[in-house]
Image (tube, rainbow, N blue to C red):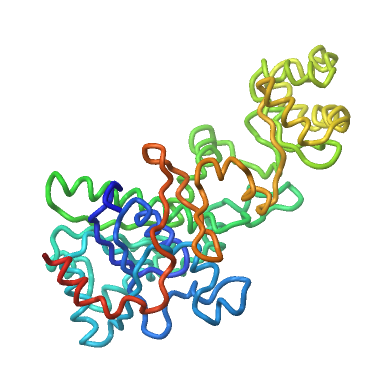
């Protein structure tokens, strides 16, 4: 991958499951050479996670396949002297060391930041954990659902009668991994100026709360605690999920001109004259009443028909798809988002470089697949 921005960057990846592997997957897509260091005979826990028991038994569970294409796998036991010696040779020439152990685990193995920095002053060492390396929660496990609860995220997911609810995918793991990848790239850029490595301490709790954005800032700035609103957008009305003839439809008529257009297409000019709905703040106060009126008219067409009609008129609207339906969208094919690797597909990063999607160059590795290449790898990294 010589034309990618991180070509030549060497990453030692000691991570498991999702946050760390997702981070190193993004780095790999950008051109980095990623070497997974896995416990002999065990490997990444994600190798045994997924809905297909046969894949899990083979150590190639779908959870592993999703985030580890294009990487190398080397088995090392950091409690054994011969393996420690190999690891130290790799560290000496690496650009990045990535781990997501509990805080302090790597230091207790004899590889704290002071030791790593003494062996490689230019090393970027990134530790992803649930709560950071210090503080009263620092020894807590980095489980996505636990972090979702402690971040306040679950308290505003769902309706007043169903909250708290878990977000439907491991969002805290993913956000933590993305934040780590961004910090690593920034540290590598900084190293070009001063030659110094960095220690990056990534907290999934803090990165998740940062990503929550408006619900957090509304409270910090205005003292207004957010509340669960289900499928409705608190910032505007009508903005949320509505009912077409055959199923749900998202409409985001956030601006006044969009609301006027919506009422015209629904043949509901009466709503524009109703003082409850005439202006933005009033519509938010009378949201349930407005939604009921809109749903009466939206039942005259299918969700697909409304999507086409409203979108063409400048009113943001779209059907609500299942995951299989979403993956089957021609839009994804047009941008090369999915890559086939044998009998399965993986996602890309969603970013095109000079019009080209970033694709993994190889399937995910079997456990220890590159053990025999370690001497050549060390020689190449040291040259």
**Please, is residue 343 above or below residue 1 in the view?**
below
Q: Is residue 368 left or right of residue 347?
A: left
Residue under the point 14% across and 64% down? 120
Count the numbered circles shown: 0
- Residue drawn where x is 69% and y is 20% of the image: 313
- Residue 348 in the image: state x and y as whole percent: 47, 51
* Quadrant in the picture for the C terminus: bottom left
- Which image quadrant for residue 49? bottom right
Asked whether, in this view, residue 297 is left or right of residue 282, the answer is right
Picture layout, residue 25 above or below residue 219: below
Q: Which residue is the extreme one toward the top?
A: 273
Please report the residue visible at 47 percent of the width from the left and 64 percent of the height from the top: 18
Q: Position of residue 188 (x, y in %)?
A: 23, 50
Residue drawn at (32%, 58%) of the image = 201
Q: Residue furthest front?
A: 342
- 239 versus 360 height, above or below: above
Position of 80 compared to 295: left or right?
Answer: left
Q: Nearer the viewer, residue 68 or 262?
A: 68
Q: Position of residue 63 (x, y in %)?
A: 53, 67
Left-right relation of 253 to 199: right
**Quick check: 375 above or below 65?**
below
Query: Relative to the observer, which residue lies in front, 157 or 185?
Result: 185
Residue 6, image x and y in percent?
28, 51
Task: Place residue 242 in its image quadrant.
Answer: top right
């Amino acid at each position: 991958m010589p034309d990618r921005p991180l070509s030549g960057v060497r990453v030692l990846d000691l991570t498991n499951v999702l946050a760390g592997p997702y981070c190193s997957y993004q780095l790999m897509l950008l051109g980095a050479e990623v070497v997974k260091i896995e416990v002999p005979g065990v490997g990444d826990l994600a190798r045994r996670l997924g809905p297909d028991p046969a894949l899990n038994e083979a150590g190639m569970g779908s959870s592993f396949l999703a985030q580890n294409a294009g990487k190398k796998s080397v088995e090392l036991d950091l409690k054994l002297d011969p393996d420690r010696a190999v690891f130290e040779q790799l560290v000496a020439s690496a650009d990045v060391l990535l781990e997501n152990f509990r805080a302090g685990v790597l230091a207790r193995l004899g590889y704290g930041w002071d030791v790593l920095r003494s062996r490689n002053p230019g090393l970027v060492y990134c530790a992803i954990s649930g709560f950071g390396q210090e503080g009263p929660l620092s020894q807590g496990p980095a489980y996505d659902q636990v972090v979702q609860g402690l971040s306040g995220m679950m308290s505003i997911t769902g309706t007043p009668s169903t909250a708290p609810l878990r977000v439907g995918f491991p969002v805290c793991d993913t956000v933590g991994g993305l934040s780590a990848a961004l910090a690593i790239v920034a540290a590598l850029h900084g190293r070009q100026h001063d030659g110094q490595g960095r220690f990056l301490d990534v907290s999934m709790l803090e990165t998740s709360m940062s990503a929550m954005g408006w619900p957090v800032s509304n409270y910090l700035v205005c003292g207004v605690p957010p509340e669960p609103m289900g499928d409705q957008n608190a910032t505007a009305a009508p903005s949320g999920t509505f009912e077409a003839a055959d199923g749900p439809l998202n409409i985001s008529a956030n601006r006044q001109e969009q609301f006027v257009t919506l009422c015209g297409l629904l043949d509901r000019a009466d709503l524009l004259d109703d003082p409850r709905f005439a202006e933005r703040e009033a519509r938010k106060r009378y949201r349930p009443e407005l939604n009921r009126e809109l749903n009466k008219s939206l039942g005259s067409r299918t969700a697909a028909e409304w999507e086409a009609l409203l979108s063409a008129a400048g009113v943001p609207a779209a059907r609500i798809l299942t995951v299989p339906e979403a993956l089957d969208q021609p839009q994804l094919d047009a941008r090369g988002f999915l890559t086939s690797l044998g009998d399965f597909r993986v996602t890309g990063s969603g970013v095109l470089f000079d019009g080209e999607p970033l694709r993994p160059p190889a399937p995910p590795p079997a456990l220890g697949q590159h053990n025999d290449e370690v001497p050549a790898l060390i020689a190449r990294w040291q040259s």
